[in-house]
Image (cartoon, rainbow, N blue to C red):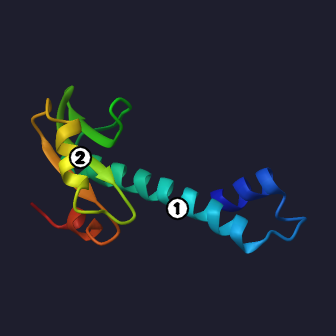
Amino acid sequence: MDLFYYLDTKYGISELNMDNKTFERVYTEKLSKYFEDFVRTALSEKYGGEEEVMLSPGVDAIITVRGKAVCCAEVKMRAGKKDLELLRSKTSNLDCDKLVIDANTIVYLFKSK
């Protein structure tokens, strides 16, 4: 629903015919944001902590318990081999679980420890 209202507000799709390329571009951008939000919420529930975002350097999700980081994660639609190395370098000062989560590895969030 959010996607429809966004597209209708921005492009007036309820009154216009939107070309497929515009729709695909917006859908892809919004889908990755929805996926990131979902993963952040799932991680906070799994670790029993608060959701946070680290803006500098950019880390998609940090889960804290009583102010201490217990998990940090990069969320990608398709993760590459270098993503974990990059996350580790961005968060070298944090002593916590470091995860790269993509559409193929999301199922591991729902497995018990």
Q: Amino acid at mark 2?
A: Leu
Q: Residue at x 64, y 56 (%)?
A: 2
Front residue of 52/16: it is 16
Question: Disc 1 designates what residue?
Answer: 31
Q: Are marks 2 and 1 in contact (CB under 8 Å)?
A: no
Real-space Cα separation, disc 2 to disc 1, in angstroms: 23 Å
Left or right relative to 23: residue 104:
left
Q: Is residue 80 above or below residue 37?
A: below
Q: Is residue 44 above or below residue 102?
A: above
Closer mark to the observer between disc 2 and disc 1: 2
Q: Quadrant of residue 53?
A: top left
Q: Residue at x 72, y 64 (%)?
A: 22
Number of labels in the image equals 2
Quarter of the image for the C terminus: give it.
Answer: bottom left
Question: Disc 2 designates what residue?
Answer: 86
Q: Secondary structure at mark 2?
A: helix
Front residue of 25/27: it is 25
Q: Amino acid at mark 1?
A: Leu
Q: Earlier in the sequence, mark 2 or mark 1?
A: 1
Quarter of the image for the N terminus: give it.
Answer: bottom right
Q: Position of residue 31 (x, y in %)?
A: 52, 61
Q: Is residue 66 above or below residue 73?
A: above
Q: Quadrant of residue 64?
A: top left
Left or right relative to 22: residue 64:
left
Q: Position of residue 43 (x, y in %)?
A: 27, 51
